[in-house]
Amino acid sequence: MRFFSKNNKNTEVMAISIAQDGLYAAVIRREPAARPMLEFLSFYPIAGLAIPVLLERLAKETPARERRRSLCLQQGDYQVLAVDAMNVPSTELKGALQWRVKEMLDFPVSEATLDYLHVPGDVSAGGRNQSLLVIVAKNQLIQQQQDLFQNAKLPLSFIDIPEAAQRNISACVEVAGRGLAMLSFDQSGGLLTVTFGGELYLSRRLDLSLDQLNQQDEESLRAVFERVSLELQRSLDHFDRQHNYITTAKLVISPLGKVGQPLQAFLAANLYMPVELMDLGDVIDLVKVPELKEADQQQKFFGIIGAALRTDAGVA
């Protein structure tokens, strides 16, 4: 199975993720000349239940069978490896990438499912500095996930990753002709992405979880903020050196609940670019899910909404 489908038919997708706390699902509806609308959103807590039971409920209680289905993997299920572009025919690229990345893996490449995203490089200079983001997961894990959904009579159309989901949201708030940095946090850690022209150019993981951000002790919280600031400075400086043809307009922080505004204020005082705190309601029509007006609820569903925003036009 490919990570990224190129089928342009019926672009309305139900995005699904299986997290530690439960099963998430979302559907976005797109209409011409209108903001994307959050058509459907659900969460089934684990609460001691097996995943097949939750999938059965999803199949019975939601429009899951009426949509194509995308599974968004969890951090730790896959790796993202940055490599230089390769001058080989597209039909031979995956085989060439297997040779390129085999020394980067801690398991045999023959046991890997592999796909890639193009990083276009400097389009004004004929694509100079093109590269690839190679996504690798173990065959066994992918097969297990496919079997879970097949047994629930909800076969998967494709598999996605959180970096691509965040890219989808970032693309909605980009400034024309400028890059956009976006920072999000969940229980597994932080994720920094930089997009330009709707394409993902950079992704970096931060080893700082949402729980660490929600420190009650002021001194501990400041130490966490300083770590975040240092990681961002290093990553964004590296991006600027590597892609000096892109000017990054600003850093946008995903909804985070009560810690969002203090973090935004700290980073705005310590970074060289404007820093904004995001409200999903400025990007997506949430009229059908009014509970998402609250930032803590937006944080909880940020990733799955990003996954539901995907389209199939030239993703890979």
Image: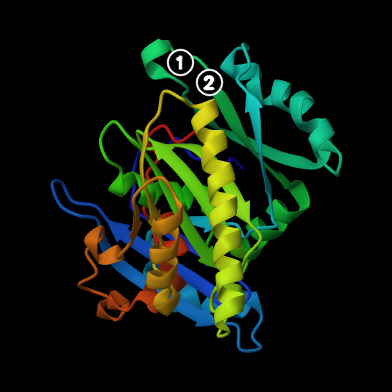
Examine the rendered structure and indicate whether residue 303 appears above or below residue 100.
Answer: below
Is 299 left or right of 203, judged from the image as shown?
left
Residue 286, given in percent of the width and then of the height, sits at 24, 69
Give the quarter of the figure containing the N terminus: top right
Which of these two is toward me, 274 or 48? 274
Relative horizontal placement of residue 287, taking residue 159 as reference (left or right): left
Q: Which image quarter: residue 261?
A: bottom left
Q: How many neighbours does mark 2 have within 10 angstroms: few (below 14), some (14-19), or many (20 or more)? A: some
**Residue highlighted by disc 2:** 130
Amino acid identity at mark 2: Gln
Q: Is disc 1 surrounded by few (<14), some (14 to 19) or many (20+) residues within 10 Å?
A: few
Q: How is the image coloured?
A: rainbow
Q: Which mark is residue 127?
A: 1
| Residue plotted at (49% across, 46% down) | 193
Q: Which residue type carries mark 1?
A: Gly
User: What whole-number distance in Å separates the C-alpha atoms at marks 2 and 1?
Assistant: 6 Å
SS of the residue at dot 2? loop
Q: Is residue 276 visible?
A: yes
